[in-house]
Amino acid sequence: MHNDCEIADGGVGVDERPLEQNQSAQREHAWIPAAVLSELRVVITGYLDGRRDLGAEVERVASGLATAAHDAGYTPERMLISLRALWREFTFSQLDRLQLASLYDRLVRRAIDRYYED
């Protein structure tokens, strides 16, 4: 349904987004390990495909982001700025942004919590 509606509106289908497993991170995201980026791609794709049972995956991504931020010497604010920029790379249409808002909020909250737990 999501894919059909978006294509009808002239958007990009879920299968056409640049979320390939081997896509390299932009230089400003180099602090995020490839495994975390890969898991984030899986979570985003799954969510856009209708999966909502992604709690364990969100926890792993949030933990990976928090650990990577600590390792890079990032403050929580810098981590969030970078995460927001990365998130924009994965969402192209207004429909994507609306669908992913809840997932983004949950991921940000958990990443902040994990940052302070580490």
Image (tube, grey):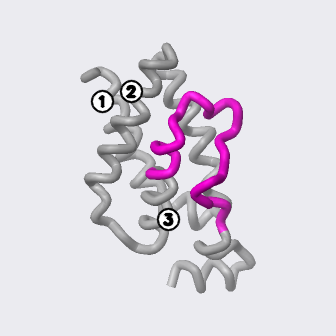
Disc on the earlier residue, 2 or 1: 2
Q: Tell me which numbered mark, 3 or 1, is placed earlier along the sequence.
A: 3
Location of mark 1 (residue): 114
- Mark 3 lies on a secondary structure that is helix
Q: Is 63 above or below relative to 6?
A: above
For label 3, the crowd category at 10 Å Cα-Cα, with few meaning under 14, some 14 to 19 and many 20 or more, is some
Secondary structure of the magenta portion, mostly? loop
Q: Position of residue 102 (x, y in %)?
A: 40, 54
Is 29 colored magenta in this rendering?
A: yes
What kind of residue is marked 3? Thr
Magenta stretch: give its range. Answer: 17-39
Q: Which amino acid does label 1 sit on?
A: Arg
Left or right, 60 with reference to 85: left
Across the whole image, how many numbered discs are drawn on residues?
Answer: 3
Question: In the figure, residue 55 lies in which quadrant?
Answer: bottom left
Residue that lies at the very extreme toward the top in this rendered image: 73
Mark with earlier residue (3, 2): 3
- Which residue is identified by label 2? 67
Numbered label attached to residue 106: none
Q: Name the residue under label 3.
A: 45
Q: Residues within 10 Å of mark 2 (few under 14, many from 20)?
A: many
Q: Residue at x 43, y 65 (%)?
A: 47
Residue at the limit of the structure toward the right, as seen here: 10
Task: Please state the horizontal and vertical placement of residue 105, each as a whole percent of the image.
Answer: 40, 45
**Which quarter of the picture shows residue 4?**
bottom right
Q: How far apart are marks 2 and 1 (CA)?
A: 8 Å
C-beta proximity under 8 Å, tags 2 and 1? yes
Q: Are marks 3 and 2 in contact (CB under 8 Å)?
A: no
Q: Quadrant of residue 59?
A: top left
Relative vertical location of residue 97 with respect to residue 105 in this rendering, above or below? below
